[in-house]
Image (cartoon, rainbow, N blue to C red):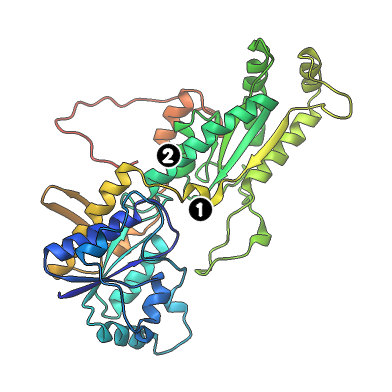
């Protein structure tokens, strides 16, 4: 293993520059040359046409800021298997041969990982540094902590405008069919309700929770001010099993439906119930808020921070994990181990698993959800009774978020 190529792919997020830096620093330490293959799998496919590649020498690596989100290597959403060229794998191998690249470190999520499996099956040596802000891989993934922290910050900030206008705020976040970022970000922001794909939403239950808590806050305020915060994940379903998505959004490059519109749908369902509820008019009149024809029910507003939760700066945790994952990927390639995903690093112990297994989707643990329901958050379903299982252990429980 004399030369390694680094690729980052899929969606950008925090911690990726730490992966790039960890790969380059370990490669330099081991006397292995490390080059950037820019723009993800699009760059890999077109590698044969490049005149030169940037080598991540110690001097060049100094200019890579691990604390910045995004990626020095660039991204694209390209599925190699979908490229129409019948000679696509030969073309990729020609490009690798042209630059003397012996193996690849590729950082990405489940879609990126599926391409890693594909490339490995065609004899291209790859090691996967897990990355997805969705946190839905079997391993921890770079970007999750950064994104969850930003979701929590934005959600907490939105309470100021919500309270000023006595609004219910609905904030929709990424996550596809796993609600990890909405769940953890919502908990961190003290959200009143958290709606995730793992739990079909009963809007009557949600409405009663909103009505009771929102009206109580305003009634108890000496200036009649209050708000209610809902964090909504994309990929949501209602209690009838219907997917709450804007069908006009289309599909992405991997053929996945673009999951947008759940926040807007939640707003519509709550607004409809507010307008039909005779008790709401009485409440508005009692609190001196009611204006006939203009302000007859509380306002429900949807906010979608979108790519703001991906950008900016990386959390310290993601920088640490990113460097460790990148460095470990180099060591695995140097050891002749490929087609695998880095799971974790503990001192000199490097743990890995088959990438095909690592990219299987992991959902939110509903036992953990039950704990937070007990603490008062609404998840759009009847609140279950928590039944703790007490057990003394001799060592800490090894787990990720």
Q: Is 196 left or right of 303, judged from the image as shown? A: left
Residue 287 vertical placement versus 256 (above, below): above
- Distance, label 1 to label 2, CA atoms, is 18 Å
**In this figure, which residue is indicated by the disc labeled 1?**
176
Q: In the drawing, what numbered circle is on residue 149?
A: 2
Please name whichever residue, 176 or 383, is drawn nearer the observer in this view of the structure. 176
Instruction: Please give the name of the residue rendered at 47% of the width and 68% of the height, measured from the top-left corner.
Output: 77
Q: Is mark 1 on a helix, strand or loop?
A: loop
Crowding at label 2, few (<14), some or many (≥20) Cα neighbours within 10 Å?
Answer: many
**Residue for point 81% across, 22% down:** 278
- Picture quarter containing residue 21? bottom left
Q: Earlier in the sequence, mark 1 or mark 2?
A: 2
Q: Quadrant of the N terminus?
A: bottom left
Q: Residues within 10 Å of mark 1 (few under 14, many from 20)?
A: many
At 47% from the left edge and 36% from the top edge, which residue is drawn?
152
Label 2 residue SS: helix
The correct choice, above or below, for 205 with respect to 358 in the image is above
Task: Pinpoint residue 242: horizontal percent, then vertical percent.
Answer: 63, 50
């Amino acid at each position: 293993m004399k030369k390694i190529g680094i690729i980052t792919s899929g969606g950008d997020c925090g911690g990726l520059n730490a992966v790039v830096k960890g790969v380059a620093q370990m490669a330099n330490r081991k006397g292995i040359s490390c080059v950037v293959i820019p723009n993800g799998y699009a760059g890999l496919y077109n590698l044969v046409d490049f005149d030169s590649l940037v080598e991540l020498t110690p001097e060049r690596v100094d200019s890579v800021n691990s604390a910045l989100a995004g990626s020095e290597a660039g991204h694209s959403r390209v599925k190699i298997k979908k490229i129409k060229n019948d000679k696509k794998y030969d073309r990729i191998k020609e490009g690798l041969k042209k630059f003397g690249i012996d193996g690849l470190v590729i950082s990405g999520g489940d879609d990126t990982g599926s391409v890693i499996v594909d490339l490995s099956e065609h004899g291209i040596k790859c090691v996967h540094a897990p990355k997805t802000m969705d946190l839905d891989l079997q391993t921890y993934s770079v970007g999750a902590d950064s994104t969850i922290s930003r979701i929590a910050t934005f959600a907490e900030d939105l309470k100021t405008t919500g309270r000023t206008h006595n609004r219910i705020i609905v904030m929709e976040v990424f996550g596809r069919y796993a609600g990890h970022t909405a769940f953890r970000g919502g908990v961190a922001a003290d959200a009143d309700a958290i709606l995730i794909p793992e739990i079909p939403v009963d809007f009557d239950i949600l409405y009663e929770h909103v009505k009771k808590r929102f009206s109580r806050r305003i009634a108890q305020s000496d200036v009649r001010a209050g708000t209610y915060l809902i964090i909504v994940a994309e990929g949501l379903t209602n209690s009838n099993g219907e997917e709450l998505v804007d069908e006009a959004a289309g599909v992405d490059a991997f053929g996945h439906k673009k999951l947008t519109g759940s926040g807007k749908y939640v707003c519509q369902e709550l607004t409809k119930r507010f307008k039909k509820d005779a008790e709401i008019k009485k409440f508005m009149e009692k609190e001196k808020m009611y204006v006939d024809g203009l302000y007859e029910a509380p306002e429900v507003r949807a906010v979608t921070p979108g790519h703001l939760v991906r950008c900016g700066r990386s959390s310290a945790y993601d920088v640490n994990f990113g460097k460790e994952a990148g460095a470990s990927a180099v060591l695995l390639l140097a050891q002749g181990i490929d087609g695998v995903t880095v799971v974790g690093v503990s001192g000199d112990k490097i743990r890995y698993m088959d990438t095909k297994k690592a990219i299987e989707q992991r959902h939110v643990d509903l036992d953990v959800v039950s704990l937070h329901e007990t603490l008062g958050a609404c998840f759009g379903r009847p609140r279950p009774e928590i039944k703790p299982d007490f057990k003394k252990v001799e060592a800490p429980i090894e787990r990720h978020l």
